[in-house]
Image (cartoon, grey):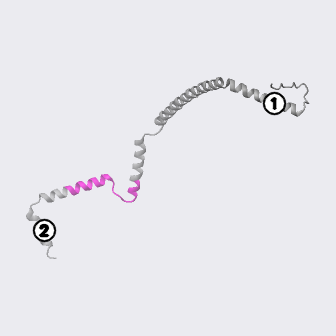
Amino acid sequence: MPAKPRPLTDNSAPAPESAHNIWLAGLGALARAQAEGGRAFEALVKQGLEMQNQTQTLAKERMAEAAQQMQQQMQAMTTQAPPWNRLGGIFEQRVAQALAGLGMPTAQELAALTARVQALEQALSTQPAAKRTTRAKRKAPD
């Protein structure tokens, strides 16, 4: 026959009786957990699924908000930032100034020189061959 717990009416109960009642309470909790364990587990699984769905929904909402904010910031940056063409023009202008400081000819000066050389080559190719050979012979006796 199981032992009956002794009622504690006095707060100054002896330690062995108190320890025995604590032991019996623990055994009762264990028995209840074993009896209701299946139902409690299923309830916890259900609560876990609900919590997971809530957090996933919240995360999707936050991601959509963040994406929208990023898109707005990108649009603001593209309207406020100077066009790349202008930046490239500033860079080219500074490089041209540096090259001019070093005495380098500009692209226009090189184009004019190239045109002059081509014109001279064309003029030489249209001269009669006899004139060219006589001049070459004069210089040859060195």
Q: Position of residue 107 (x, y in %)?
A: 32, 52
Q: Which residues are magenta?
A: 97-118
Element carrying mark 2? helix
Q: What is the magenta segment's predominant secondary structure?
A: helix
Which amino acid does the dot numbered 2 rest on?
Answer: Arg
Q: Position of residue 60 (x, y in %)?
A: 53, 28
Q: Position of residue 88 (x, y in %)?
A: 40, 45
What residue does disc 2 label? 135
Which residue lies at the image location 42% right of the left edge and 47% below the top edge? 90
Which amino acid does the dot numbered 1 rest on?
Answer: Ile
Nearer-the-camera pick, 131 or 2: 2
| Above or below: residue 79 compared with residue 34 | below
Which quadrant holds residue 26? Answer: top right
Badge 2: few (under 14), some or many (20 or more) residues near its Cα, within 10 Å?
Answer: few
Q: Is residue 130 left or right of residue 47?
A: left
Which quadrant of the figure contains the N terminus? top right
Q: Is residue 118 left or right of residue 61?
A: left
Which quadrant of the figure contains the C terminus? bottom left
What residue does disc 1 label? 22
Which quadrant holds residue 132? Answer: bottom left
Asked if residue 130 is among those painted magenta in the image, a careful observer would answer no
Badge 1: few (under 14), some or many (20 or more) residues near its Cα, within 10 Å?
Answer: few
Which quadrant holds residue 31? Answer: top right
Nearer-the-camera pick, 9 or 82: 9
Tag in front: 1 or 2: 1
